Amino acid sequence: MDDKSELYAEILEIEEQLGIQYANLGKLKRKIVSLLEDNKRLSIENQQLRRILRMEQQKEREASDGDSAPAPAMGEGYINLARLYNEGFHICNIYYGHLRTEGDCLFCLAFLNK
């Protein structure tokens, strides 16, 4: 009977160890599920951030393209306004079209220098 009780005790011990390992396996499964969920969330967030980054980079390129473009040549309107000013007329929004009688007008000059 001694062998039988030892055998039974061994089986109980193995069963207990299997229970512990089963509980550990459950913990690991929950951790894996959590990691997979985090990974999916981070992947989606990463995609969104990359899309936003591409949009921002495109805006910056468009802005820098506009800044680096050569200054447009003086248009006909600017030339006509400069001619009117040189002929003695105001071109500023305050006195536009009036004859300049007192020399240079700071408003007109500021307008021309824009």
Image: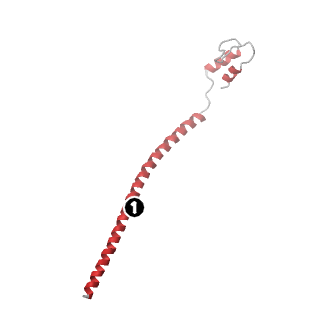
Would you say 23 lies left or right of 79 here? Answer: left
Task: Identify the residue position indicated by label 1 in the image.
Answer: 31
**Front-lying residue, 87 or 27:** 27
Position above or below: 34 against 96:
below
Residue at x-position 70% and y-position 11%: 99
Position above or below: 68 against 101:
below
Would you say 80 lies left or right of 11 here? Answer: right
- What amino acid type should be assigned to the residue bearing mark 1? Lys
Q: Where is residue 59 in the image (x, y as percent from the top left)?
A: 52, 38
| Mark 1 neighbour class, 10 Å CA radius: few under 14, some 14 to 19, many 20 or more | few
The C terminus - image quarter: top right
Report the colour scheme.
Answer: secondary structure
**Front-lying residue, 24 or 84:** 24
Residue at x-position 71% and y-position 21%: 106
Count the marks.
Answer: 1
Q: Position of residue 88 (x, y in %)?
A: 71, 13
Would you say 83 lies left or right of 7 here? Answer: right
Q: In which quarter of the image is residue 72?
A: top right
Q: Where is residue 74 in the image (x, y as percent from the top left)?
A: 63, 24
* Residue placed furthest toward the right: 103
Task: Tell me the SS state at disc 1.
Answer: helix
* Residue placed furthest toward the bottom: 2
Q: Quadrant of residue 30?
A: bottom left
The N terminus - image quarter: bottom left
Residue at x-position 51% and y-position 41%: 56
Residue at x-position 26% and y-position 87%: 3
